Amino acid sequence: MASILVMGPSFFGYRDMVAAEFKRMGHAVNTINDRPSESVMFKSLGRISYRLVDSEIAAYAKKVEEIIAESQFDFVVYLSGMSFCFTFSQLESMRRASEAHFVAGLWDAFDNCQRLGACRSLFDDVYSFEPRDCEKYGLKLRPLFYSGSYMNLPLEPLDGFKWDACFIGSVHQRSKFHSVHATCNALKERGLRVFEWYYMPSKSIETLRKAEDPEYRGVEFKHETLTPAQVADVYAYSRAVVDSPQAGQSGLTIRTLETLGAHRKLITANADVYNYNFYRSENVAVIDSREKSQGIMDDFFSHSYSELPKDVYESYSLHSFAETMLGMGEPFSGYRKASNVDDFDPCDIPRGVFVEDGLTASLVDCGLCAPAGVR
C-alpha cells in the first residue's frame, strides 16, 4: 500500500475521482487544492499573472510543504495544468521535504500552463493528454478517463432513446461554443432531437460574453454542473454526444472518453480522433465546424453502435489512468499518427497493422478493428 497526496483543482470532481480510485486500489490518500483560493477574484487575477497573488501563493506553498514533510508520502500526484501556481523554488522546497515520487497528469495544453513549464524538471514523470505537446516537449501521452458512472449502460434503453444527440459542457471559450452551438442547431434543423446543457462558470462571464458576442444572446446557460451520474443518465438516453476541443487543442476531452465509456456515438470537430484505436467510422463522425452537420451521414443515427474490443475500453478507464499515474500497468499505446487522416479508416486496415509516414508497420494487438464476430 502506498501513501499518496493528490493535488489539483476541485472543479468537476476529476481530482476526487482519481483519489477515490487510488483508495479503491488499497492506497492511503489525501487530497488538497493546487492553489490557495477557488474564489473568482483569485482565479481572475491568476489568469492575468500569478505575480498579482504571489503573497497568497507563497503562504500556501509553505503550508503544502509542511503537509508533505509531516506525512512523508510515497507519491505526490498533481492533476490539471493551468491552475498550477507554484514557483520553481516553492516546488523545489516541497520536493526536498520528502522522498516522494512527483508525478504530473496534465489536461491543459502545456503552453497554457504559466508556471508548470518552469517546474517540469522537478517532476519525475509528466503525462499529458495532448499528443502535440508530447512530441514537442518530450512528455508521456496519457489520455484522460471515463468513470464507472458510464460503464454498463445498455446499448439502447428499453423505453427507447429520448435524444438523437446531446451536449453537456462548458462554453465560455468562444470557438468551442460557436462549434457546438452551430452543430446542435444544424442537427435540430434536420429534425433531430438534441439535449443541450451549456455551462457558464458565473453569471458575470455570461453577461460579458453576451455583450461581446451576439451568438451568445438568446441562449439559455446553466450555472451549475451535473454530477457524473446525471450526465450518464442523459447519455443513456442519447444516441450520440456532441463535442469540440478548445481552440488550439487536439487532445481528447474528457467528454470524448465519457462517450466511449458509455458506448455511445461521437460527433466531434477534433480530427485527431482518427489516430486513436477506438476510431470506427460507424461510431465517430468527424465534422468541420464550418460545415456544421453536413459531414454526418443519415445512417450514422439509424445504425447501431459497433462494439469495440474489451481492452480498448479498459485502456481509457479511470482505473487505467490511476495505474499510469503510479507507474503501474502497460504504458498507453492506443495512439498512432496516420499519414493521411482525411482518408484514414482503421476498419480498412488489416488487424494488427497501422500506417505511418506512408509505410506499413506492424502493431501488436492494436484493437483498431473489432473481431469479425463483433462487427
Image (tube, rainbow, N blue to C red):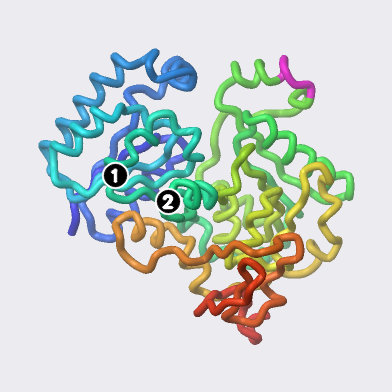
Q: Is residue 133 left or right of residue 246?
A: left
Q: Which residue sits at x=48%, y=18%? A: 48
Could you tell me which quadrant the C terminus lies in? bottom right
Q: Is residue 146 magenta?
A: no
Q: Which residue is mark 1?
A: 123
The boundaries of the magenta stretch are: 210-214
Residue 106 vs residue 311, the one in the foreground? 106
- Single out the residue that lies furthest toward the bottom: 373
Could you tell me which quadrant the N terminus lies in? bottom left
Q: Residues within 10 Å of mark 1 (few under 14, many from 20)?
A: some
Residue 203 x/y as whole percent? 60, 19
**How many numbered discs?**
2
- Single out the residue that lies furthest toward the right: 190
Residue 350 x/y as whole percent? 65, 82
Q: Residues within 10 Å of mark 2 (few under 14, many from 20)?
A: few
- Residue 39, compared with residue 287, is above or below; it is above
Q: Which residue sits at x=28%, y=30%? A: 88
Indicate the amino acid at tag 2: Gly
Residue 236 vs residue 21, the one in the foreground? 21
Q: In the picture, residue 52 is in which quadrant?
A: top left
Q: Which residue is mark 2?
A: 138
Residue 101 x/y as whole percent? 22, 49
Q: Is residue 127 left or right of residue 184?
A: left
- Residue 226, compared with residue 56, is above or below; it is below
Indicate the amino acid at tag 1: Phe
Q: Secondary structure at mark 1?
A: loop
Residue 314 vs residue 353, the one in the foreground? 353
